[in-house]
Image (cartoon, grey):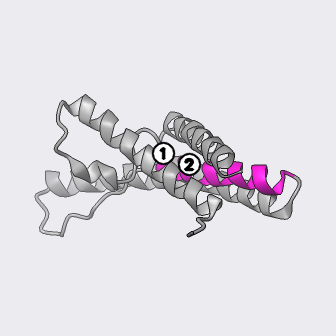
Amino acid sequence: MLALSPYLLAAACAWLVAQGLKYLFVSLRDHSFRNLRQLYLSGNMPSAHSATVIALLVVIGGRDGIDTAIFGLAALFSAVVMYDSVMVRRSSGEQGKAILAMLLERKSTIMIPRTAKGHTPLEVIVGAFVGAFVGFVVFFATS
């Protein structure tokens, strides 16, 4: 029988659940279930990045203990990813939208760049809760 890593399983499941919820929320908001790109795009509610790292953190804490070096590393990694989502990626996304608006306003011939979206603090918090839930489910299902 193939043994799956509970660590990778938690991360993958959290990503799938968060991206699925993101697709559902955007589809309900737009009254259309046709935009399948939401299944892999960044930004919007909830943060799949946060869900993924927190699910991994929960499984590491449950299986290896919260007093281990790997848990400390995972906690630091999670904090960096979530901080980056809110502060760095969100800021660069807003700057990208401003540049895009200027290019369109001036009818520039410069190729229009793609803008990536970051997350609001609420999107990161909800993503973390999704990740914690999935992490606990995977932990108890694989223990």
Q: Which residue is mark 2?
A: 50
- The answer to which quarter of the image holds residue 64 is bottom right
Q: Is residue 39 left or right of residue 111?
A: right
> Which x, y percent locates residue 57?
69, 52
Up the image or down, 2 lies above or below 83; here it is below
Q: Is residue 130 left or right of residue 141?
A: left
| Count of marks, rendered view | 2
> Which x, y percent locates residue 66?
84, 51
* Outermost residue toward the front in this view: 1
> Which x, y percent locates residue 10?
58, 54
Chief secondary structure of the magenta portion: helix
Q: Determine the secondary structure under disc 1.
A: loop
Neighbourhood count class around disc 2 (C-alpha, 10 Å): few under 14, some 14–19, many 20 upward: many
Neighbourhood count class around disc 1 (C-alpha, 10 Å): few under 14, some 14–19, many 20 upward: many
Q: Is residue 88 left or right of residue 39?
A: right
**Relative depth, front residue between 41 and 65:** 65
- The answer to which quarter of the image holds residue 113 is bottom left
Does residue 31 appear anywhere in the picture? yes
Q: Which residue is mark 1?
A: 47
| Residues rendered magenta in the picture | 47-66
Picture residue at 32% right of the left edge, 51% below the top: 39
Q: Is residue 92 left or right of residue 125?
A: left
The answer to whether the residues at label 1 and label 2 have Cβ atoms under 8 Å apart is yes
Up the image or down, 19 lies above or below 113; here it is above
**Relative depth, front residue between 74 and 104:** 74
Picture residue at 72% right of the left edge, 58% below the top: 74
Picture residue at 50% right of the left edge, 57% below the top: 12
Magenta stretch: residue 141 in it? Answer: no
At label 1, which amino acid type do we have?
Ser
Alpha carbon of mark 1 to alpha carbon of mark 2: how far?
5 Å
Picture residue at 23% right of the left edge, 50% below the top: 36
